[in-house]
Image (spheres, rainbow, N blue to C red):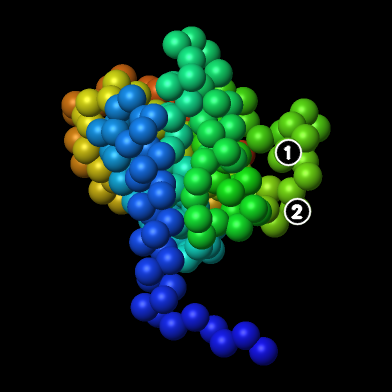
Amino acid sequence: MRTPPTKPAAQERRQALLQGVKRLADAFDPDPQHSAQVTALSLSLFDRLSGLHGYRGRPRLLLEIAAVLHDIGWSRTRNSGHHKHSRDMILEGNLPGLTERERTLCALVARYHNKAMPDKKRHRAFAELSRQDRELVSWLAAILRVADGLDCNHAGAAGGIREIVADEKQLIISLTEPDRCAAETRRARQKSDLLERTTKRKVIFR
């Protein structure tokens, strides 16, 4: 029987993985400050929504990786479709420490940060996932879409997430700098479509 890894060994592997992610981002991300802000917003949203999604640990790390790398596809295009290039580059990249399943999940979360939402009838890679993994991708991509919308101008204007209040019908997201980010709030509202579908709640920004 395999001996479970010690905490220091697991931490070392996590750090090696994040170093690989950083190398990939450093090589191809056109705006690392934007990606850092989107990553911070994504993780804040993830933590504050934990009572709804119930994930922790590894899924949070997969969201972090997808957020850091969500825009690397711009290095391959000057027009549309960068989200698909980001997916492909994550699948191709040197990221030791990810299983093939986890690499696919990260790639799909990055792919769905923009444009189309996950659809098992139209997207074969998504359809081939287990039901549990489709739910995970939908949750993580929903969070990443909102976080990306909140920094649509790449200026950090939205600040951070002050709090999230959920009831049976609404999800109210309060921002730390609501008076400085009208454009970002509008874009985040547009990109909250998947979060509304996933949570079955109307998303409101304040």
Secondary structure at numbered mark 1 = helix
Whether residue 192 is visible here, answered yes or no, is: no
The residue depicted at 59 percent of the width and 40 percent of the height is 91
Secondary structure at numbered mark 2 = loop
Q: Is residue 144 above or below residue 188?
A: below
Q: Is residue 79 above or below residue 23?
A: above
* Residue 120: quarter of image: top right
The residue depicted at 45 percent of the width and 11 percent of the height is 78
Mark 1 — residue? 125
Q: Give residue 8's position: percent from left, percent from top.
A: 36, 78
Q: How far is mark 2 from mark 1, CA to CA?
A: 11 Å
Mark 2 — residue? 130
The quadrant of the image that shows the C terminus is top left
Whether residue 101 is visible here, answered yes or no, is: yes
Crowdedness near tag 2: few (<14), some (14–19) or many (≥20) residues, C-alpha within 10 Å: few
Mark 2 or 1, nearer chain start: 1
* Front residue (pair 92, 199): 92
Q: For the residue marked with disc 2, what is the amino acid?
A: Ser
* Residue 72: quarter of image: top left
In screen coordinates, is 158 left or right of 27?
left
